[in-house]
Image (cartoon, rainbow, N blue to C red):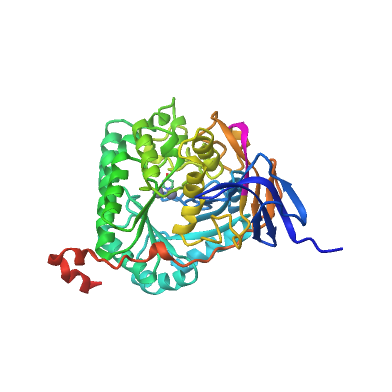
Amino acid sequence: MTEPAYDLLIRGGRVATVSDVFEADVAISGESIVAIGRGLSGARREIDARGKLVLPGGVDSHCHIEQLSAAGIMNADTFESATVSAAFGGTTSVISFAAQHVGMKLPQVLEDYHALAKKGAVIDYAFHMIIADPTKETLETDLPALIKQGHGSIKIFMTYDRLKIDDEPLLDILLAARDGGAMLCAHAENHGIISWMVKRLLARGYTHPKYHAISHARVSEAEAFTRLIGMAALIDQPIMIFHVSTAEGAKVIRDARGQGLKVFAETCPQYLFLTADDLDKPGAEGAKWMCSPPPRRAADQEALWQALALGDLQTISSDHAPYRYDETGKLRAGPNPSFKQVANGLPGLEVRLPLLFDSMVSKGRLGVEKFVDLTSTAPAKIYNLHPRKGSIAVGADADIAIWDPVREVTLSDDMMHDLAGYTPFAGRKLRGWPVTVLSRGRVIVNDGKRSVEAGSGRFLARSGGEAAKPTGRLVSDMDPEQNFGARLL
Ligand code: DUC
Ligand code: ZN
Ligand code: ZN
């Protein structure tokens, strides 16, 4: 008897990549894709994918897992629950955060998050390092060593009382990122505008969750983007701007990219499918839809779709940040909290891809190739996980989601696998569902059933890679008046 050529064959599906959709069998041996073609045979096991779409598993490059919020509230999820919910939604890699708070040593922070993920994760993972305390030791000793250990991206907040980084230390961090070759990701909103608005709203008794959206005045986004982009250009450090929510914000990014600056940007399903009106519910209920930045208007949704189509925004992540609608989470300050007392964030790891598949593939908005790009290939490339992740190609990890394009599912709270206890998208009827999901060749979800052990996900060590490389063109070179600036770096 001859040995089977492959461990597993996904037979007869339509494979989609960023550039093509074609009928092919996908053969897997061990953890990798080893052949793609028609009429392959000789495998220990087969999956019949006729009538299905065979896509690279999703890469969710912005999700908060087992993380303490700015206000010291723990997320509802563990690495196990979060990554299981990701897997049920077709996502096979996550980049979550190792979050420093003031006074914490960064190496210890990384060690702690690694221990949590190693114990619980069922899919592969990497970390963005959040810097909230940019001491000399953090920037000059710890950060360079941790980047070399495979943490190729940093995140900073320009707002939140306990996390925010002011302009001068931000320049220090941008320079440290450049020296280490790491990507710099940012939550960019103007802190002063938001806290000024919050104080005035609360002083006048406007405490309902809907005022959260008003407190994050639209200009706070475009202003912070402009300031961050200016500082990054001064240093020549590539940046990723997280969760773009407004048309004006998207325009700032378009203009910067038009000038040749290395500015990347993402948006999230909440800015494409929700609006500020979702926060306007009786009592405190609107807290379930509270995130920062807040969902905006229908016109912003259109502007964001346009920015995605044009390539101004390159990725769509979930910004999964789950808090239960009870005294452990959203209602920690009581049943009728002011909007300022409510933890910011929405669960979204599980529904990110189904929401986008329905819109982009089933309803035809931008198509399946762009869906694959925005949700898998582009984040894998930007964060230097590609071609191992984000691709159906020979040699890539066999991280695959097999989608039934005609299955109809109505989202409900109780079908979610995370621990938030609700989905902000409940009641939406979607067409298209990931029925079988593979991580490194293992079937981890099939037809609504989990078949993967906690702790079997692996850490993805990565450098900053190509996207994080400076352009070599300093702002000071573009403006002879400022030429002296280059000597200060
Ligand atoms: N805003 C953040 O900045 N992070 C987590 C979730 C949120 O709403
Ligand atoms: Zn954020
Ligand atoms: Zn976030």
Is 76 left, or right, of 233 in this rendering? right
Q: Exactly how many numbered labels are in the figure?
A: 0
On the image, which quarter does residue 218 sit in?
Answer: top left
Which image quadrant: the C terminus? Answer: bottom left
Residue visible at 52% across and 38% down in the picture? 361
336 or 46, which is in the foreground?
46
Q: Going by the picture, which residue comes out furthest to the right?
A: 1
Residue visible at 49% across and 57% down in the picture? 380
334 or 156, which is in the foreground?
156
Image x and y of residue 366, in percent? 45, 39
**Majority SS type along the magenta span:** strand
Instruction: Judge whether residue 443 is colored magenta.
Output: no
Residue visible at 77% across and 57% down in the picture? 42
Is 72 left, or right, of 77 in this rendering? left
Image x and y of residue 257, in percent? 30, 53
Q: Which residues are magenta?
A: 401-411
Mark yes or no: residue 98 visible.
Answer: no
Image x and y of residue 480, in percent? 14, 66
